Amino acid sequence: MKVSIIGGGGLVGSCAGFALQAGKIVSDIVLVDVNRELCEGQALDLLHGASLMAPQRISAAGTEAVKDSDVVVITAGLRRKPDESRLDLINRNVALFRTILADMKQHGLKKDAIVFVVSNPVDVLTYLAVKELGLPASQVIGLGTVLDTTRLRSMLAQRLNVPPTQVSVTIFGEHGDSMVPIWSMAQIANLPLEKFPGVNPTLIAEVEKKTRGSGAEVIKKKGGAGFAVGVSIADVVHSIALDDNRIHPVSSLMSGAYGVRDVCFSIPTVMGRSGVKSHIEVELWSKEKTALVQSTNVLKETIAKVLNK
């Protein structure tokens, strides 16, 4: 499988490239960036370690690489400022994103290509990609709350001193301020979270607050997220490559789940080689449903502003 990463010279794109290399599943990794020299440097750095990894082709190229790519990951974009919401980025990133989409259309995409949006605000830009690329909606996804979900799991595991891999809790809705942690379904090693030793409402509230502010904290301390978002991207791409029907909280076009239509956001989604195979709708607490409706409204309002420009 050939994966092209637009924005591959930057922190997120290069970390995604390394995570895909370390995953040893995809066969071809291409980094694409407006800064060609930086992009070539990142590809060269990856190539230098190839003998210790897997028999993969690694290169730097222009946007023409998308024409025969199986997955196109778009990470290019301006970074969020420490105190800026992800939705505030829309005025600064939409023009750039539309240019990228136009370049992709000019070169053409494979009929079965999957377009994977990571650039922020990811839900809004995923919606734009659905509307402007002309691909079936199932073939356009966004990273959504995949990163938020792994942050929440990891932070909860740290507080409870349990393995992160045994924590199960998922975030629905927007990748941003209106995200909705689904505590009603949370488990530790298949045990209900609310019955797990040491868990109480105060701890849950603290972990949730820490998760909501974690992106800004990373930006403040090191300039931007890289490692966690890289492995999050690779995790989804591997599901596509392996056609494994794993469930991820990616962002995709809603078509009736929870009564929501014509907006992209995250709910449990079965992923495979064809992209989105299905959405899974589970019963939520009343307050979670209310928060999810609010998240929908926030995104629809922003999408309306974008389309009216």
Image: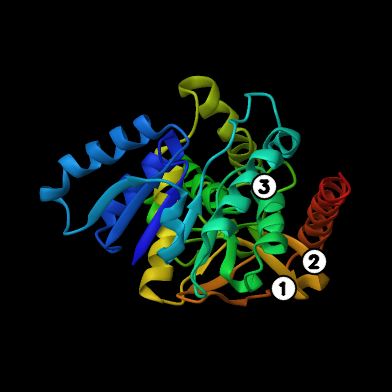
Q: CA distance from mark 2 to mark 1?
A: 21 Å
| Position above or below: 265 against 282 | above
Q: Please name the residue shown 72% across and 73% down the image.
A: 283
Q: Which residue is mark 1?
A: 283
State the quadrant of the N terminus: bottom left
Residue where numbered disc 3 is placed: 98
Q: Residues within 10 Å of mark 3 (few under 14, many from 20)?
A: some
Front tag of 2 and 1: 2
Crowd tier of the residue under label 1, counting other residues whose Cα lies within 10 Å: few below 14, some 14–19, many 20 or above: few
Q: The residue under label 2 is which amino acid type?
A: Asp
Which of these two is toward me, 4 or 67? 67
Asked which quadrant contains residue 172, the reply is bottom right
The nearer-to-camera label among 3 and 1 is 3
Res. 231 mark: none
What colouring does the structure picture have?
rainbow
Residue at the extreme top of the image, as rendered: 221
State the separation of the CA atoms marked 3 and 2.
Answer: 19 Å
Kindly indicate the quadrant of the structure image that contains residue 182. Answer: bottom right
Are the residues flagged by discs 3 and 2 in contact, CB closer than 8 Å?
no
Of callouts 3 and 1, the N-terminal one: 3
Q: Which mark is residue 262?
A: 2
* Crowd rating for badge 2 (residues with CA inside 10 Å; few <14, some 14–19, many 20+): some
Nearest to N terminus: mark 2 or mark 1: 2
> Residue shown at 16%/48% (left/top)?
50
Give the Cα separation between the discs numbered 3 and 1: 37 Å
| Residue 67 place in picture, x, y as percent | 45, 62
Is residue 189 visible from the viewing direction of this image? no
Q: Quadrant of the C terminus?
A: top right
> In the visual, does 193 lie left or right of 235?
right
